[in-house]
Image (cartoon, helix red, strand yellow):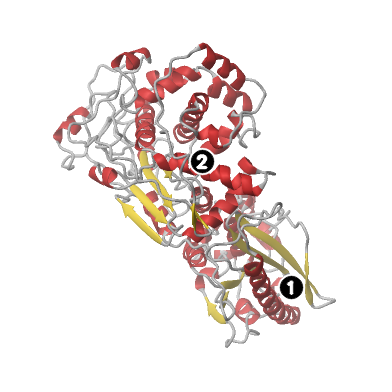
Amino acid sequence: MSSADSLRERPNGVTSNPSAKGKDASLMPPTKSLVGRALGNELHADGHKGATASKDGVGFALTDTPVSTAPSSPQFSANTTQPSTPSRVRATTLDIPGLTKSKVSPDGRIAQRDVGSKLVIVMVGLPARGKSYITKKLARYLNWLQHDTEIFNVGERRRVAAGKSPSPPGRHRSARTSSIHKDLVDSVRRLSVSVGGAFGSPAHRDSAHLEPATSPPELDNHLPPPAVPTKILINGREEDDSYHNGSTIVPPFHASPEDQRAMEEAESNEPLDQSASFFDPKNQLAVKLREQVALDTLDELLNYILEEGGSVGILDATNSTMERRKAIVDHIRQRAGPELNILFLESSCVDQELLEANMRLKLSGPDYKDQDPVKALEDFKKRVALYEKSYVPLGEYEERNNMAYIQMIDVGRKVVSHQTHGFLSSQVVYYLLNFNLSPRQIWITRHGESKDNQSGRIGGDSDLSENGHRYAKALARFIDEQRKLWESLQRQKDIMQQFPPRPGDSTPPNPSYVPRDRPRNFCVWSSMMKRSIQTVDYYNEEDYDVKQMKMLDELHAGKMEGMTYEEIREKYPDDYATRKKDKLYYRYPGPGGEGYLDVINRLRAVIVEVERMTDHVLLVTHRAVARVLLAYFLGLKRNEVADLDVPLGMLYMLEPKPYGVEFKAYRYNPETDWFDHIPDFKLRQATMN
């Protein structure tokens, strides 16, 4: 089915407030309205007319506050002649895996029918403003919290469409290519229509076989003018703006013979040129391809949310014009109705050093791989200038129309939030408020060997063994040496840094680092269990900030505390089998019994604090907790968390980078009483426990 058919055949099911909505309307309760909203009674009346969508996606609740998971109202079959009657306004509640459950969501995850609880995050911003960095960290955090989240990167799919990159992982190539190149002309014309007729006459709209969506009378459709283009300063020098021309608005397309030949070339195996000229609005073929890829990527995202059980979809693209953002909202409303929540997230940079560092990182990316850095920089600046010409930041228009958005300036130096009242939106804001790019090291290890470890017993609160004390002493010496080594290497980086980068230099500097006269602070955190506290006894508190945290305690085994796994298997065979089948969702029975989801939720404050702080930190904890921490920092999949092999004597180092996390592992060697680096180490799954 083509995109146009999909748009025409999918019902809107419009309501005035987020409520339960599934793929089959016959399985869902009657539509509900929310009385007393500031939008006026006209919208509430229109909310029950069926297939009428808001033109701008505004005028309906755009927050992502989850709906109640209480049993729904009586259902009616699709062919019933009985009229549906509006039911009461249902309470809105949060969904947290492991901490909440209901009949429609027994595991606490957002139910497939609860479209009003789901969220689409639309990124906004010029190139080299850190959008992809933000989206990757945000997706990692939300997935770690067990809210299914996926990133849909338009640039990645654009490179695929232009023949320069393989298909994105997890997406079948045949499905992708059939939607990108098939009916490209109609898709671009359809996109032009969806932005409100700004590009053509009524005849053009009629030719696309799509009626323009109507806009509520109280909405302000006046678009603000484009922002005044800023100058790109590289090392303090203002660049020539002779290439600042054109617009990114898509003109109505009439296929000429030249266009047809160009289309045939686009469908060939030859890669398209993707230099700055590819982003020139005068390059009609490139404009059509970019707009079609953007629409195709948005459809992938909506499929993920509406049909594949996803909770959060992130559209990673510039989306720098108001026309593009209106088109995105229109398309979401046409496919999903007013219930699916939209949050715009803009990243901007005013700090020139940060912008330079971001550009340097961009030059090592896929668009400029293996190219001369000086020429690549010049081309990239031209690309940015083309976007700047028509760039309209978030702000006044969104506020007038009650749209939810977040603005991040300099990747967290300043954060502006507007109408982010929903549960998922509030989680996003809370996390983004604790962003920083400061380079530092995060060390994770288990406590030294305990007496209960020697006897194979789980839980408990035993002391360290003699071997455990040896490990603790060696750990303190090793950390002290690594701390000094890191400071020395960082000073060398500052001296050798230059821009543009030299050929072959693919390690961009971190813009947040400011050379200091003294070493960074170093925090040492342990759990409140004796074996963990004793492991950190050997740090000089004049040089290290030592603290104990209850959140780092081992997973509590309830009534099975102090038992061996063999004893559990013999005494509680059903529990043993249930836990082995699904450790992530299993909770130990008895007073204080916990599961991995409980550990994830009590570690949330620790994760956010580590993200906020700019100091080094060593976390001395326990097996289940170490598994959960490593799963977050390395972005591991849900089914990998509870079975990670994290033995005693292993020390893990994670260093945040602008492009991800650098990961190293060290193993304690009892013979040398020191730690050996393990090259190319990869975490693996444990065979037991």
- Rendering coords of residue 8 (x, y %): 38, 18
Q: Quadrant of the C terminus?
A: bottom right
Q: Image quadrant of residue 663?
A: bottom right
Q: CA distance from mark 2 to mark 1?
A: 62 Å
Q: Position of residue 262 (x, y in %)?
A: 57, 19
Marks 2,1: beta carbons within 8 A: no
Looking at the rendered structure, the kind of residue marked 1 is Gln
Q: Position of residue 487 (x, y in %)?
A: 64, 74
Residue 532: give x, y in percent of width and height: 62, 76
Query: What is the crowding at mark 1: few (fewer than 14 residues within 10 Å), some, or many (at least 20)?
Result: few
**Three-letter code, disc 2:** Arg
Q: Is residue 57 visible?
A: yes
> In the picture provided, is 493 more to the left or to the right than 278?
right
Image position of 59 with respect to 576: above or below: above
Residue 454: mark: 1
Q: Which residue is mark 2?
A: 383
Residue at the (65%, 69%) spot, across then down: 495
- Name the element at disc 2: helix
> Is 205 drawn above or below residue 481 in the view shown?
above
Query: Which of the pair 414/610 is nearer the observer?
Result: 414
